[in-house]
Amino acid sequence: MERRAIIHKLNQNSYCIDDAGESLSYVVLGSAKAAVIDTANGRENLLQVVREITDLPLVVINTHGHCDHVFGNVFFEEAYIHPADVEVHDQHFATKKDVSIPEEIRARVTEEEIEWFLNAKPCKLLPILPGDIVDLGDVQLEVIGIPGHTRGSIALLNKADGYLYSGDAINKGQFWMQLPESIPLEQYVETLDSLEPYRPYIKELHGGHSVAAFEPEFIDVMRAGIVEIIERGGEGDGKTPWILGIADSHEISDGTLVLYDKNKLRK
Ligand SMILES: [Zn+2]
């Protein structure tokens, strides 16, 4: 298979694996186990890439059920996911066979490799819930529920270094809340408020699509932008095309474009 991954060392026990600029996985090392947070698009053997970093036993966790975070599960035995996102995980795996492989990729991989990937089955899923602790030995990751982008979105907090692995739950640049599986914006504001007890611990947000970390104050910027959309009732906002349609969109103060659905502002 083609080499896509670029490994970035973030600190002494945390790594970011950039899957050709499409999505990110993270590896967090403890004394007994290592966590693999999200598994990207599955177009490269992520297990082999992780093995360049560590030989430790692995705990694989999906921050949510979208294809660009779970397709790489095919290289592992099992993965943890919030039960509320199993349905969207299953939907995305069901469409894997319909994905057309771009010509430039066909030129670089064999027909057998393409066949293998298209036929690969999702791994066994195990439930993970807010409040759970992923114990890696001397490192613990606390599971925090961040429903919004999807109902079962979770983040993992390492209180020791202040890293919050947030998947797509609070994204900079472009933030997707327009999906059928996204919750109403008003409810998402409650989600952001529920992070208050964790705020003293959060030093950096490591999201699913930006190698550069976000500062924790971005949570407040996002909240203010979302409240603005709700209060104006979407008045004056534009439209932005995305892969499956055209969504309402609003640029918040830092320039991040929030895609949303005007019919899902309030609970
Ligand atoms: Zn997503």
Image: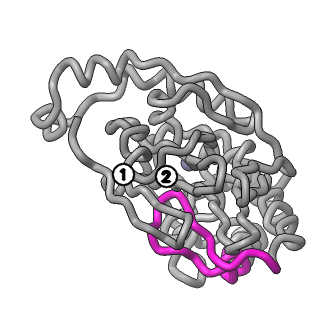
Q: Is 248 on the left or on the right of 19, as rendered?
A: right
Colour scheme in use:
one colour
Q: Is 265 on the left or on the right of 99, as rendered?
A: right
- Image quarter hosting the N terminus: top left
What SS does tag 1 mark?
strand
Magenta-drawn stretch, dominant element (helix, strand or loop)? loop
Picture coordinates of residue 115, whole percent (x, y): 27, 17
Query: Pointer 1: what residue?
Result: 19
Category of crowding for the residue at label 1, using alpha-carbon neighbours closer than 10 angstroms: few (below 14), some (14–19), many (at least 20):
many
Category of crowding for the residue at label 2, using alpha-carbon neighbours closer than 10 angstroms: few (below 14), some (14–19), many (at least 20):
many
Write the residue at 45% across / 41% down.
244
What SS does tag 2 mark?
strand
Write the residue at 36% across / 51% down.
19
Amino acid type, mark 1: Asp
Residue 190 is drawn in which quadrant? bottom right
Picture coordinates of residue 93, whole percent (x, y): 50, 25
Residue 116 is drawn in which quadrant? top left
Q: Are marks 1 and 2 in contact (CB under 8 Å)?
A: yes
Query: Pointer 2: what residue?
Result: 25
Distance, label 1 to label 2, CA atoms, is: 8 Å
Write the residue at 42% across / 25% down.
96
Q: Is residue 7 magenta?
A: no
Q: Nearer the viewer, residue 231 or 23?
A: 23
Picture coordinates of residue 233, whole percent (x, y): 73, 66
Is any atom of residue 228 visible in this view?
A: no
- The mark found on residue 70 in the picture is none
Up-down relation of residue 216 to residue 42 (above or below): below
Q: Is 81 on the left or on the right of 14, as rendered?
A: right
Up-down relation of residue 39 to residue 199 (above or below): above
Q: Which residues are magenta?
A: 200-222
Write the residue at 87% across / 65% down.
194
Up-down relation of residue 225 to residue 186 (above or below): below
